Image: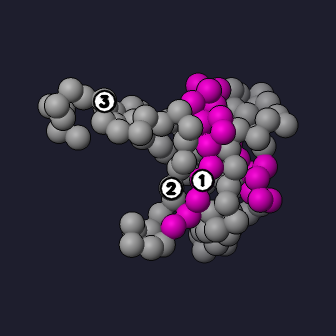
């Protein structure tokens, strides 16, 4: 059973929320779809994130809303995503979602860059 929560673990910027709504509309998905974010792995330079549109909440999901968009986060990822802000950028850095996570390490943790970061 999913757990509704008042915790604002992840905040969407208005541009991220608008892009999510646009993707839902372009793909002709209904209102049952939510934005899922999860930790997809970890490298020496920090977390890798998974992002998806999902209408099948899992038993251990927390469900909340930001900028009018429903968000799903599994229990394991929630502990590492709390306080994160997700933005959508389209500038000199590229185009896509950008996760500003307070738990993210600021730089490569490998000694002398030996891991190829």
Q: Is residue 69 shown in magenta?
A: yes
Which mark is first along the chain, 2 or 1? 1
Q: Which residues are magenta?
A: 65-89
Disc 3 is placed on an element classified as: loop
Residue at image coords 60%, 53%: 86
* Residue at position x 49%, y 45% in the image: 50
78 in relation to 34, above or below: above
Residue 31 in the figure: left or right of residue 110: right
Q: CA distance from mark 2 to mark 3?
A: 21 Å
Residue 67: % across, % down? 77, 59
Alpha carbon separation for disc pair 3 and 1: 24 Å
Q: Are marks 1 and 2 in contact (CB under 8 Å)?
A: yes
Residue at the image point whose x is 56% and y is 64% from the top? 88
Position of 27 with respect to 106 (left or right) is: right
65 over 29 or under it: above or below? above
Observer able to see residue 57: no
Which residue is tagged 1?
86
Q: Quadrant of the N terminus?
A: top right
Residue 88 on the magenta span = yes
Which residue position holds label 2?
98
Quarter occupied by the C terminus = top left
Q: Which residue is mark 3?
A: 109
Mark 3 crowdedness (10 Å alpha carbons): few <14, some 14-19, many ≥20: some
Camera-side residue: 95 or 30?
95
């Amino acid at each position: 059973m999913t757990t509704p929560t008042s915790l604002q673990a992840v905040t969407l910027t208005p541009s991220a929320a608008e892009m999510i709504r646009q993707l839902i509309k372009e793909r002709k998905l209904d209102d049952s779809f939510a934005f899922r974010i999860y930790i997809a792995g970890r490298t020496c330079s920090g977390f890798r994130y998974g992002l998806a549109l999902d209408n099948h909440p899992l038993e251990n999901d927390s469900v909340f809303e930001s900028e009018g968009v429903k968000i799903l986060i599994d229990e394991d990822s929630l502990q590492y995503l709390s306080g994160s802000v997700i933005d959508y950028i389209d500038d000199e850095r590229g185009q896509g979602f950008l996760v500003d996570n307070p738990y993210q390490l600021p730089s490569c943790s490998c000694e002398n860059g030996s891991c190829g970061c």
